[in-house]
Amino acid sequence: MSESPMSATELDALLPALVDLRRDLHAHPELAYTEHRTAGIVARELRELGLEVHTGIGGTGVVATLRHGSGRGCIGLRADMDALPIVERSGLPHASTVAGVHHGCGHDGHTAMLLGAARHLARHPRFDGTVHFIFQPAEEGQGGAHAMIRDGLFERFPCDAVYALHNWPDLPLGHAQTRPGPIMAAADRFDITVHGRGGHAAMPQHTPDAILAASQLVTQLNTIVARAIDPVESAVLSVTQIEGGHAHNVLPGTAKVTGTVRSFNPAVQDRIEATLRAMAEGVARGSGTRVEVEYLRYYPATLNSADEARLALAAAADAGLHAAEAPHPAFTSEDFAFMLQAKPGAYLWLGQGRADPGPDGERALHHPSYDFNDNALPLGIRWFAAVAARALPAG
Protein backbone atom coordinates (compact mmCIF):
# COMPACT_ATOMS: atom_id res chain seq x y z
CA MET A 1 0.00 0.00 0.00
CA SER A 2 1.27 3.47 -0.83
CA GLU A 3 1.86 6.23 1.70
CA SER A 4 -1.29 7.99 2.92
CA PRO A 5 -2.02 10.88 0.54
CA MET A 6 -2.34 13.49 3.29
CA SER A 7 -2.36 13.93 7.02
CA ALA A 8 -5.44 14.73 9.06
CA THR A 9 -3.93 18.12 9.93
CA GLU A 10 -3.46 19.01 6.27
CA LEU A 11 -7.04 18.04 5.51
CA ASP A 12 -8.55 19.81 8.49
CA ALA A 13 -7.00 23.05 7.31
CA LEU A 14 -8.80 22.78 3.97
CA LEU A 15 -12.28 21.81 5.08
CA PRO A 16 -13.98 24.88 6.59
CA ALA A 17 -13.47 27.00 3.47
CA LEU A 18 -14.48 24.11 1.20
CA VAL A 19 -17.70 23.50 3.12
CA ASP A 20 -18.54 27.19 2.76
CA LEU A 21 -17.74 27.06 -0.94
CA ARG A 22 -19.83 23.92 -1.47
CA ARG A 23 -22.83 25.47 0.25
CA ASP A 24 -22.42 28.67 -1.75
CA LEU A 25 -22.50 26.63 -4.96
CA HIS A 26 -25.58 24.82 -3.66
CA ALA A 27 -27.34 28.10 -3.00
CA HIS A 28 -26.53 29.36 -6.53
CA PRO A 29 -27.11 26.36 -8.83
CA GLU A 30 -26.80 26.67 -12.61
CA LEU A 31 -28.18 24.47 -15.38
CA ALA A 32 -26.26 22.83 -18.22
CA TYR A 33 -24.03 25.19 -20.21
CA THR A 34 -25.02 28.15 -18.02
CA GLU A 35 -22.51 27.43 -15.23
CA HIS A 36 -20.89 30.86 -15.64
CA ARG A 37 -20.78 31.80 -11.96
CA THR A 38 -19.63 28.33 -10.94
CA ALA A 39 -16.93 28.22 -13.62
CA GLY A 40 -15.76 31.68 -12.60
CA ILE A 41 -15.38 30.62 -8.98
CA VAL A 42 -13.55 27.44 -10.02
CA ALA A 43 -11.16 29.34 -12.31
CA ARG A 44 -10.45 31.97 -9.63
CA GLU A 45 -9.69 29.33 -7.00
CA LEU A 46 -7.37 27.46 -9.35
CA ARG A 47 -5.52 30.59 -10.46
CA GLU A 48 -4.93 31.53 -6.81
CA LEU A 49 -3.08 28.21 -6.50
CA GLY A 50 -0.77 29.22 -9.33
CA LEU A 51 -2.10 26.59 -11.72
CA GLU A 52 -2.29 26.96 -15.48
CA VAL A 53 -6.04 27.54 -16.07
CA HIS A 54 -8.08 27.34 -19.28
CA THR A 55 -11.76 28.28 -19.50
CA GLY A 56 -14.60 28.04 -22.02
CA ILE A 57 -13.85 24.43 -22.99
CA GLY A 58 -16.97 22.74 -24.31
CA GLY A 59 -18.96 25.82 -23.36
CA THR A 60 -18.33 26.55 -19.68
CA GLY A 61 -15.76 23.87 -18.89
CA VAL A 62 -12.58 24.64 -16.96
CA VAL A 63 -9.28 22.73 -17.01
CA ALA A 64 -6.30 23.43 -14.76
CA THR A 65 -2.90 21.79 -15.08
CA LEU A 66 -0.41 20.97 -12.33
CA ARG A 67 3.03 19.61 -13.22
CA HIS A 68 5.54 18.22 -10.75
CA GLY A 69 8.83 16.41 -11.19
CA SER A 70 10.17 14.99 -14.43
CA GLY A 71 7.65 12.22 -15.02
CA ARG A 72 6.04 12.01 -18.44
CA GLY A 73 2.81 10.43 -17.22
CA CYS A 74 -0.39 12.48 -17.16
CA ILE A 75 -3.88 11.86 -15.79
CA GLY A 76 -7.20 13.68 -15.72
CA LEU A 77 -9.35 14.08 -12.60
CA ARG A 78 -12.88 15.15 -13.43
CA ALA A 79 -15.81 16.75 -11.59
CA ASP A 80 -19.19 17.89 -12.96
CA MET A 81 -20.64 21.32 -12.17
CA ASP A 82 -24.28 21.54 -13.35
CA ALA A 83 -27.52 21.38 -11.40
CA LEU A 84 -30.99 20.02 -12.17
CA PRO A 85 -34.28 21.67 -13.20
CA ILE A 86 -35.96 20.75 -9.89
CA VAL A 87 -37.66 22.86 -7.24
CA GLU A 88 -35.67 22.35 -4.03
CA ARG A 89 -37.69 21.51 -0.92
CA SER A 90 -34.93 20.85 1.62
CA GLY A 91 -35.59 23.90 3.79
CA LEU A 92 -31.86 24.18 4.50
CA PRO A 93 -30.16 27.51 5.21
CA HIS A 94 -28.10 27.07 2.03
CA ALA A 95 -31.04 25.95 -0.13
CA SER A 96 -31.25 27.10 -3.72
CA THR A 97 -31.92 30.78 -4.29
CA VAL A 98 -32.68 30.12 -7.98
CA ALA A 99 -36.29 29.24 -8.72
CA GLY A 100 -36.68 25.79 -10.21
CA VAL A 101 -32.98 24.90 -10.09
CA HIS A 102 -31.47 22.53 -7.50
CA HIS A 103 -28.14 20.79 -6.92
CA GLY A 104 -30.08 17.57 -6.48
CA CYS A 105 -27.27 15.27 -7.60
CA GLY A 106 -24.35 16.56 -5.56
CA HIS A 107 -22.30 18.13 -8.32
CA ASP A 108 -21.65 21.03 -5.93
CA GLY A 109 -19.90 18.48 -3.70
CA HIS A 110 -17.96 16.96 -6.59
CA THR A 111 -16.70 20.42 -7.60
CA ALA A 112 -15.66 21.24 -4.03
CA MET A 113 -13.86 17.90 -3.65
CA LEU A 114 -11.83 18.35 -6.82
CA LEU A 115 -10.96 21.93 -5.84
CA GLY A 116 -9.84 20.57 -2.47
CA ALA A 117 -7.68 17.96 -4.20
CA ALA A 118 -6.16 20.67 -6.41
CA ARG A 119 -5.36 22.78 -3.33
CA HIS A 120 -3.74 19.84 -1.56
CA LEU A 121 -1.76 18.59 -4.53
CA ALA A 122 -0.53 22.09 -5.38
CA ARG A 123 0.81 22.44 -1.83
CA HIS A 124 1.94 18.84 -1.30
CA PRO A 125 2.65 17.30 -4.73
CA ARG A 126 3.32 13.68 -3.83
CA PHE A 127 3.32 12.60 -7.46
CA ASP A 128 5.64 12.76 -10.46
CA GLY A 129 4.05 13.89 -13.71
CA THR A 130 1.06 15.99 -14.80
CA VAL A 131 -2.44 16.22 -13.36
CA HIS A 132 -5.24 17.90 -15.32
CA PHE A 133 -8.20 18.97 -13.17
CA ILE A 134 -11.26 18.80 -15.44
CA PHE A 135 -14.39 20.69 -14.35
CA GLN A 136 -17.12 19.65 -16.74
CA PRO A 137 -20.41 21.38 -17.59
CA ALA A 138 -23.71 19.80 -18.55
CA GLU A 139 -23.56 16.26 -17.23
CA GLU A 140 -27.31 16.04 -16.63
CA GLY A 141 -28.42 14.69 -19.99
CA GLN A 142 -26.76 17.40 -22.08
CA GLY A 143 -23.46 15.72 -23.01
CA GLY A 144 -20.96 18.17 -21.55
CA ALA A 145 -18.19 15.57 -21.59
CA HIS A 146 -18.74 15.02 -25.30
CA ALA A 147 -18.71 18.79 -25.86
CA MET A 148 -15.37 19.12 -24.09
CA ILE A 149 -13.90 16.27 -26.13
CA ARG A 150 -15.14 17.84 -29.37
CA ASP A 151 -13.49 21.06 -28.24
CA GLY A 152 -10.11 19.31 -28.13
CA LEU A 153 -9.96 18.30 -24.46
CA PHE A 154 -7.55 15.42 -24.87
CA GLU A 155 -5.53 17.02 -27.65
CA ARG A 156 -4.93 20.12 -25.53
CA PHE A 157 -4.60 18.24 -22.24
CA PRO A 158 -3.25 14.73 -23.00
CA CYS A 159 -4.21 12.10 -20.44
CA ASP A 160 -2.99 8.53 -20.09
CA ALA A 161 -6.11 7.84 -18.01
CA VAL A 162 -9.07 9.70 -16.52
CA TYR A 163 -10.82 9.25 -13.18
CA ALA A 164 -14.06 10.53 -11.66
CA LEU A 165 -16.35 9.83 -8.74
CA HIS A 166 -20.00 10.26 -7.81
CA ASN A 167 -21.47 10.51 -4.35
CA TRP A 168 -23.67 7.48 -3.66
CA PRO A 169 -26.39 7.75 -0.97
CA ASP A 170 -27.01 3.98 -1.12
CA LEU A 171 -23.50 3.34 0.26
CA PRO A 172 -22.62 4.27 3.85
CA LEU A 173 -20.23 7.14 4.43
CA GLY A 174 -16.68 5.79 4.38
CA HIS A 175 -17.37 3.12 1.74
CA ALA A 176 -16.45 3.14 -1.94
CA GLN A 177 -17.16 0.79 -4.83
CA THR A 178 -16.36 0.34 -8.48
CA ARG A 179 -15.72 -2.54 -10.85
CA PRO A 180 -13.98 -3.38 -14.12
CA GLY A 181 -16.28 -3.17 -17.14
CA PRO A 182 -19.75 -1.65 -16.94
CA ILE A 183 -20.49 0.52 -13.93
CA MET A 184 -23.35 2.66 -15.36
CA ALA A 185 -25.79 1.99 -18.19
CA ALA A 186 -26.23 3.45 -21.63
CA ALA A 187 -29.23 5.76 -21.82
CA ASP A 188 -31.59 5.94 -24.81
CA ARG A 189 -34.81 7.90 -25.26
CA PHE A 190 -37.70 7.06 -27.54
CA ASP A 191 -40.60 9.25 -28.67
CA ILE A 192 -43.31 7.51 -30.68
CA THR A 193 -46.07 9.65 -32.19
CA VAL A 194 -49.19 7.77 -33.28
CA HIS A 195 -51.25 9.58 -35.91
CA GLY A 196 -54.95 8.73 -36.24
CA ARG A 197 -57.53 10.99 -37.82
CA GLY A 198 -59.46 12.45 -34.93
CA GLY A 199 -63.23 12.53 -34.64
CA HIS A 200 -66.27 12.05 -32.46
CA ALA A 201 -65.88 9.49 -29.68
CA ALA A 202 -69.43 8.22 -30.41
CA MET A 203 -68.47 7.30 -33.99
CA PRO A 204 -65.16 5.38 -33.67
CA GLN A 205 -65.83 3.50 -36.93
CA HIS A 206 -64.86 6.64 -38.82
CA THR A 207 -61.64 7.32 -36.91
CA PRO A 208 -58.45 5.25 -36.58
CA ASP A 209 -57.98 5.44 -32.81
CA ALA A 210 -54.58 6.87 -31.86
CA ILE A 211 -55.23 6.41 -28.12
CA LEU A 212 -56.10 2.73 -28.52
CA ALA A 213 -53.08 2.13 -30.76
CA ALA A 214 -50.81 3.88 -28.27
CA SER A 215 -52.22 1.77 -25.45
CA GLN A 216 -51.56 -1.43 -27.39
CA LEU A 217 -48.05 -0.22 -28.12
CA VAL A 218 -47.30 0.43 -24.45
CA THR A 219 -48.28 -3.14 -23.61
CA GLN A 220 -46.15 -4.57 -26.39
CA LEU A 221 -43.10 -2.42 -25.61
CA ASN A 222 -43.01 -3.86 -22.12
CA THR A 223 -42.44 -7.35 -23.57
CA ILE A 224 -39.25 -6.45 -25.46
CA VAL A 225 -36.76 -7.09 -22.68
CA ALA A 226 -38.55 -10.23 -21.53
CA ARG A 227 -38.99 -11.79 -24.97
CA ALA A 228 -36.47 -10.28 -27.41
CA ILE A 229 -33.35 -10.05 -25.22
CA ASP A 230 -31.19 -12.94 -24.04
CA PRO A 231 -32.02 -13.54 -20.35
CA VAL A 232 -28.32 -13.40 -19.41
CA GLU A 233 -28.17 -9.78 -20.59
CA SER A 234 -29.40 -6.82 -18.54
CA ALA A 235 -31.70 -4.12 -19.85
CA VAL A 236 -34.62 -1.96 -18.78
CA LEU A 237 -37.31 -0.36 -20.94
CA SER A 238 -39.73 2.01 -19.23
CA VAL A 239 -42.59 4.00 -20.73
CA THR A 240 -42.63 7.27 -18.80
CA GLN A 241 -45.13 9.50 -20.65
CA ILE A 242 -48.36 9.06 -22.57
CA GLU A 243 -49.95 12.17 -24.07
CA GLY A 244 -53.11 12.51 -26.12
CA GLY A 245 -56.57 14.01 -26.11
CA HIS A 246 -58.15 17.09 -24.62
CA ALA A 247 -61.88 16.35 -24.30
CA HIS A 248 -63.92 13.42 -23.01
CA ASN A 249 -65.96 13.06 -26.20
CA VAL A 250 -63.25 13.51 -28.83
CA LEU A 251 -60.93 10.89 -30.27
CA PRO A 252 -57.64 12.77 -30.68
CA GLY A 253 -55.75 12.85 -33.93
CA THR A 254 -52.45 12.03 -32.26
CA ALA A 255 -51.07 10.32 -29.19
CA LYS A 256 -47.47 10.24 -28.01
CA VAL A 257 -45.57 7.55 -26.11
CA THR A 258 -42.21 8.45 -24.54
CA GLY A 259 -39.76 6.42 -22.52
CA THR A 260 -36.21 5.35 -21.79
CA VAL A 261 -34.06 2.28 -22.42
CA ARG A 262 -31.04 1.34 -20.30
CA SER A 263 -28.53 -1.34 -21.28
CA PHE A 264 -24.83 -2.22 -21.16
CA ASN A 265 -24.18 -4.07 -24.43
CA PRO A 266 -24.31 -2.23 -27.80
CA ALA A 267 -25.73 -5.37 -29.44
CA VAL A 268 -28.60 -5.29 -26.95
CA GLN A 269 -29.15 -1.60 -27.74
CA ASP A 270 -29.39 -2.47 -31.44
CA ARG A 271 -31.86 -5.31 -30.81
CA ILE A 272 -34.09 -3.19 -28.59
CA GLU A 273 -34.22 -0.29 -31.03
CA ALA A 274 -34.95 -2.56 -34.01
CA THR A 275 -37.68 -4.44 -32.12
CA LEU A 276 -39.26 -1.22 -30.88
CA ARG A 277 -39.42 0.19 -34.41
CA ALA A 278 -40.90 -3.06 -35.75
CA MET A 279 -43.53 -3.15 -33.00
CA ALA A 280 -44.55 0.44 -33.68
CA GLU A 281 -44.98 -0.27 -37.38
CA GLY A 282 -46.93 -3.44 -36.62
CA VAL A 283 -49.37 -1.63 -34.33
CA ALA A 284 -49.82 1.07 -36.97
CA ARG A 285 -50.66 -1.46 -39.67
CA GLY A 286 -53.10 -3.28 -37.42
CA SER A 287 -54.88 -0.14 -36.27
CA GLY A 288 -54.94 1.89 -39.45
CA THR A 289 -52.79 4.59 -37.87
CA ARG A 290 -49.39 5.95 -38.82
CA VAL A 291 -46.36 6.17 -36.51
CA GLU A 292 -43.24 8.29 -36.29
CA VAL A 293 -40.39 6.95 -34.16
CA GLU A 294 -37.54 9.04 -32.81
CA TYR A 295 -34.87 7.02 -31.00
CA LEU A 296 -31.97 8.88 -29.41
CA ARG A 297 -28.92 7.17 -27.92
CA TYR A 298 -27.72 10.05 -25.78
CA TYR A 299 -25.25 8.41 -23.36
CA PRO A 300 -23.19 5.25 -23.93
CA ALA A 301 -22.52 2.77 -21.14
CA THR A 302 -19.86 3.80 -18.63
CA LEU A 303 -17.17 1.14 -19.02
CA ASN A 304 -14.20 1.08 -16.65
CA SER A 305 -10.91 -0.31 -17.90
CA ALA A 306 -9.67 -3.15 -15.70
CA ASP A 307 -6.30 -1.76 -14.59
CA GLU A 308 -7.72 1.67 -13.79
CA ALA A 309 -10.64 0.17 -11.85
CA ARG A 310 -8.16 -1.74 -9.71
CA LEU A 311 -6.12 1.43 -9.20
CA ALA A 312 -9.27 3.33 -8.19
CA LEU A 313 -10.09 0.74 -5.53
CA ALA A 314 -6.49 0.64 -4.28
CA ALA A 315 -6.53 4.45 -4.02
CA ALA A 316 -9.79 4.25 -2.07
CA ALA A 317 -8.11 1.91 0.41
CA ASP A 318 -5.13 4.29 0.61
CA ALA A 319 -7.59 7.08 1.41
CA GLY A 320 -8.91 5.13 4.39
CA LEU A 321 -12.14 4.04 2.70
CA HIS A 322 -13.72 0.61 2.91
CA ALA A 323 -13.14 -0.29 -0.74
CA ALA A 324 -14.98 -3.15 -2.44
CA GLU A 325 -15.78 -4.26 -5.96
CA ALA A 326 -19.33 -3.29 -6.87
CA PRO A 327 -21.44 -6.46 -7.19
CA HIS A 328 -23.29 -5.12 -10.22
CA PRO A 329 -23.55 -1.94 -12.32
CA ALA A 330 -26.31 0.64 -11.92
CA PHE A 331 -28.95 1.37 -14.54
CA THR A 332 -28.48 5.11 -14.11
CA SER A 333 -26.27 6.77 -16.73
CA GLU A 334 -23.31 9.14 -16.73
CA ASP A 335 -21.69 11.13 -19.47
CA PHE A 336 -18.20 10.43 -18.11
CA ALA A 337 -18.82 7.46 -20.43
CA PHE A 338 -17.68 9.64 -23.35
CA MET A 339 -14.33 10.24 -21.66
CA LEU A 340 -13.96 6.52 -21.01
CA GLN A 341 -14.61 5.86 -24.70
CA ALA A 342 -11.66 8.12 -25.49
CA LYS A 343 -9.27 7.12 -22.66
CA PRO A 344 -8.75 4.33 -20.14
CA GLY A 345 -10.08 5.20 -16.73
CA ALA A 346 -12.46 4.47 -13.89
CA TYR A 347 -15.55 5.87 -12.22
CA LEU A 348 -16.02 5.38 -8.47
CA TRP A 349 -19.08 5.42 -6.24
CA LEU A 350 -18.28 7.27 -2.99
CA GLY A 351 -20.65 6.49 -0.13
CA GLN A 352 -22.34 9.42 1.55
CA GLY A 353 -25.13 7.63 3.42
CA ARG A 354 -25.62 9.09 6.88
CA ALA A 355 -25.75 6.93 10.00
CA ASP A 356 -28.79 8.95 11.11
CA PRO A 357 -30.50 10.24 7.96
CA GLY A 358 -33.61 11.42 9.79
CA PRO A 359 -37.20 10.18 9.92
CA ASP A 360 -37.66 10.22 6.14
CA GLY A 361 -34.48 8.26 5.41
CA GLU A 362 -31.55 9.10 3.14
CA ARG A 363 -32.60 11.32 0.27
CA ALA A 364 -31.94 9.77 -3.11
CA LEU A 365 -30.15 11.52 -5.94
CA HIS A 366 -32.53 13.87 -7.82
CA HIS A 367 -34.89 14.10 -4.82
CA PRO A 368 -36.25 17.63 -4.16
CA SER A 369 -34.85 17.48 -0.60
CA TYR A 370 -31.50 15.91 -1.45
CA ASP A 371 -28.35 17.59 -0.13
CA PHE A 372 -24.74 16.53 -0.49
CA ASN A 373 -23.24 15.19 2.75
CA ASP A 374 -20.35 17.52 3.63
CA ASN A 375 -18.77 14.73 5.70
CA ALA A 376 -17.91 13.08 2.36
CA LEU A 377 -15.76 16.05 1.26
CA PRO A 378 -12.53 14.90 2.92
CA LEU A 379 -13.02 11.36 1.64
CA GLY A 380 -13.31 12.48 -1.96
CA ILE A 381 -10.29 14.78 -1.60
CA ARG A 382 -8.25 11.91 -0.17
CA TRP A 383 -9.31 9.64 -3.02
CA PHE A 384 -8.40 12.11 -5.78
CA ALA A 385 -5.01 12.69 -4.14
CA ALA A 386 -4.43 8.96 -3.74
CA VAL A 387 -5.27 8.35 -7.40
CA ALA A 388 -2.60 10.88 -8.41
CA ALA A 389 -0.07 9.25 -6.07
CA ARG A 390 -0.73 5.77 -7.46
CA ALA A 391 -1.09 6.70 -11.13
CA LEU A 392 1.97 8.98 -11.10
CA PRO A 393 4.23 7.46 -8.45
CA ALA A 394 7.09 9.58 -7.15
CA GLY A 395 10.54 8.00 -7.14
Image (tube, rainbow, N blue to C red):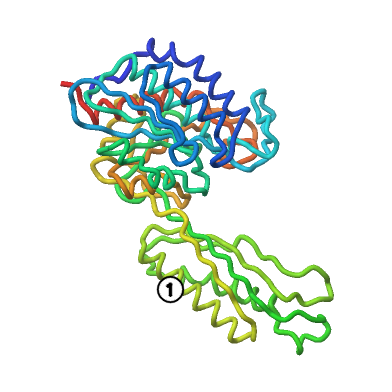
Residue 200 in the image: state x and y as whole percent: 82, 81
Q: How many marks?
A: 1
Viewer-nearest residue: 221 or 175: 221
Q: Residues within 10 Å of mark 1 (few under 14, many from 20)?
A: few
Find the residue positioned furthest to the bottom: 205
Q: Tell me the quarter of the picture where residue 8 sits.
A: top left
Q: Nearer the viewer, residue 55 or 351?
A: 55
Residue at (81% x, 86% y) in the render: 203
Q: Amino acid at mark 1?
A: Ala
Looking at the image, residue 100 lies above or below residue 272: above
Of 375 and 105, the residue lying toward us? 105
Q: Is residue 239 visible?
A: yes
Circle 1 SS class: helix
> Residue at coordinates 54% horizontally, 80% vertically from top-left?
281
**Residue 246 image position (x, y, % from top left):** 79, 68
Q: Quadrant of the C terminus?
A: top left
Q: Quadrant of the N terminus?
A: top left
Answer left or right for 132 relative to 19.
left
Judging depth in this view, the residue of 49 and 280 nearest the camera is: 49
Lateral position of residue 177 relative to residue 130, left or right? right
Q: Which residue is mark 1?
A: 228
204 is higher (above) or lower (below) than 172? below
Residue at figure coordinates x 23%, y 26% from the top left: 129
Residue that extends furthest to the left in the rendered view of this protein: 395
Residue 82 placement (x, y as % from top left): 53, 37
Location of residue 232 (image quadrant): bottom left
Residue 210: image location, x then y, percent? 69, 77
